[in-house]
Image: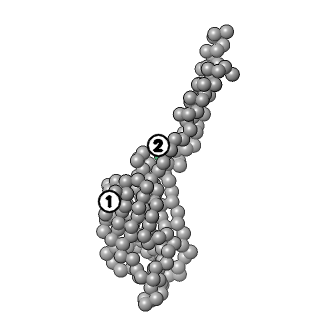
Amino acid sequence: MTRRLLVALLVLGAFLVPGSPAWAHNQLTYAEPAADSKLAAPPTSVTLRFVETLKPDFTTIVVSGANRQRVPSTPPAIQGNTGVLTLTGELANGLYTVAYRTVSVDGHAVQGSYTFVVDDPAKPAAAIAVAAPSSSSKDGGFAMIPVLIAVSAGIVLAAVAFFLRMRRRQV
Ligand SMILES: [Cu+2]
């Protein structure tokens, strides 16, 4: 391996290693009600805070009940990296899911959901058995990684072939 080839591969490698800014995706950092929490009184709003500033046109926050019925609310009020959903109806006892979808600075969609339980002792117990709370998040950017790895491998192979041919010609 010539020194020139080695340098070329190192330079290529530096470009191909995932850098943080372009790869960092928007992410939920704070939620009220918190994920998997059990509330003794129904919440009147849902607040979600993210790492990056939210684009109002591309941000959705929806709360739905155990029957998958959407809880009446205002559209999310977006301020900086925080979205606040005001719930306009009172929540009965039961399991609720908060689902969100927004975009990262690089345009990739980020979505996730989590659940919380309302269990007000002064109110009738939930009609539907409360399932074990769970939370999940899905990152649209992950689908891109295999493609990027394949493209990167192709570029490296092409570079190696190119330098080997150049070297052969010089001899
Ligand atoms: Cu991305």
Separation of residues labelled 1 and 2 (CA atoms)? 23 Å
Q: Is mark 1 within 8 Å of ligand 1?
A: no
**Where the N terminus falls, by quadrant?**
top right
Residue type at tag 1: Gln
Left/right of residue 82 with respect to residue 15 in the rendered view: left
Q: Is residue 77 visible?
A: yes
Q: Position of residue 83 (x, y in %)?
A: 36, 62
The residue indicated by pointer 1 is 79
Residue 81 position in % (x across, y down): 37, 57
Could you say which is closer to the camera, residue 58 or residue 3?
3
> Which residue shows up at 30% across the image and 68% down it?
74
Q: How many marks?
A: 2
Give the amino acid type for the residue marked by disc 2 in the picture: Ala
Q: Nearer the viewer, residue 103 or 80?
A: 80
Q: Indicate the position of residue 124 as horizontal and vertical percent values.
A: 44, 89
Label 2: how many Cα within 10 Å (few below 14, some 14–19, many 20+): few
Element on which disc 2 rests: helix
Residue 85 placement: quadrant: bottom left
In this picture, is 127 found above or below 139? Answer: below
Q: Secondary structure at mark 1?
A: strand
Query: Alpha-carbon neighbours of circle 1 within 10 Å: few (<14), some, or many (≥20)?
Result: few
Q: Quadrant of the rendered structure where residue 90 is?
A: bottom left
Q: Is residue 87 left or right of residue 145?
A: left
Q: Which comes sooner in the sequence, label 1 or label 2?
A: 2
Residue placed under numbered mark 2 in the picture: 22
Q: Which residue sits at x=51%, y=57%? A: 138
Q: Is mark 2 within 8 Å of ligand 1?
A: yes
- Work out which quarter of the rendered image holds the C terminus and state it: top right
Q: How is the image coloured?
A: one colour
Say the numbered circle drawn on residue 62.
none
> Does 75 appear above or below 5?
below
Res. 160 visible in picture: no
